[in-house]
Image (cartoon, helix red, strand yellow):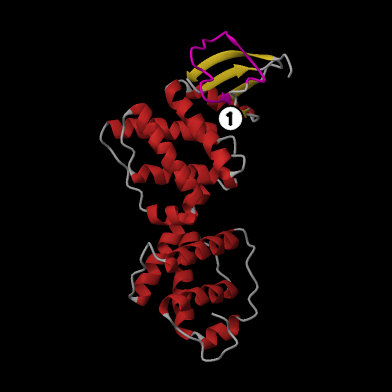
Amino acid sequence: MTDRRYIVERTLNNNVLIVRTDDGREQILVGRGLGFGVRPGASIHSDDERIEKRFTLVAEENQEKFRKLYLQVSPEVIGVSEEIIAAAVKGLGTSLHEHIHVALADHIGFALTRLQGGLEIENPFLEEIRTLYPKAWALAEAGAQLIEKRFQVVMPESEIGFLTLHLQAAAHRDGLSEAARVTDAIRVAVDVLERETGRPISKDSLDYARLVTHLRFAIQRVLKEECIVNPLASAIRERLPKSYAYAAAVTDALEERLKTTFPRDEVADLALHVARFIGERDLHDDVEL
């Protein structure tokens, strides 16, 4: 054990401290009971066994935004945000982009203001978000419960969806706008497929989960220009004409929405998933469904 000690700059709540390390860096410490009864100026041992997570913002831009955050939201909001982030790092098994320390607290603060005023923003992508990101959803749900407990405000499912997107975006470095863009595109794709086939897709079904998961990866591949090569594309188009036509209608809508192009190989790959949904069978046996 070392004998280094940190100086406490802020106590955000009973579980979160902002400290200054011995080399002058600001650090966020999270751990049960870590801030209980602690005042600014006090010292805490760097090896305190209660410390569960440590976060240091590296980018100067994020450091500055984090300092300004105190002018916009209460320390209690920042504290609960840090507890949610710490749980997410543990639950997702990965580090999060450091901007989450600013973005999540800012979102929670604004959400609390809205909800306390009786204003809920509709989230039209709840089923897609829940299906696409089950781990992040579970963590967001636990985070919403923590917010409810601390601030006595009911957090509707729409807010769980928004929290999920923040956590997912931070975990995968794509950014919130990119995660929202993919989720929006999936919603468009499902709507088009239901309209074209005349068959609603149960959001609780295995077909829906498979379709949404496939669409997510297909859209991400196209956006990154890392599309698959499907040597059976011509055969699929010939032998599964209805499914291919439906898949083409979906990708046409996605091209318009995303301002990009879906290669024929991706259309054919989607057609296989559509074939499972509508029950179209190949006339031959050499195209695996």
Measuring from the top left, give residue 31's x and y in whole percent: 55, 25
278 left or right of 262 in image: left
Quadrant in the rendering for residue 202: bottom left
Residue 246 part of the magenta-drawn span: no
For the residue marked with disc 1, what is the amino acid? Asn
| Furthest residue in direction right, as rendered | 2
Question: Which of the 4 quarters of the picture holds residue 285?
Answer: bottom right
- Along the horizontal axis of the image, is 149 left or right of 269? left
Residue that badge 1 annotates: 62
- Compared to residue 98, the image places residue 136 above or below, namely below
Residue sitting nearer the eye, 267 or 213: 213
Which quadrant holds the N terminus?
top right
For label 1, count other residues whose C-alpha is less than 10 Å away and answer few (under 14), some (14-19) or many (20+).
Answer: some
Residue 66 x %, y %: 54, 26
Magenta-colored span: 29-48
Q: What element carries label 1?
A: helix
Picture layout, residue 259 above or below residue 179: below
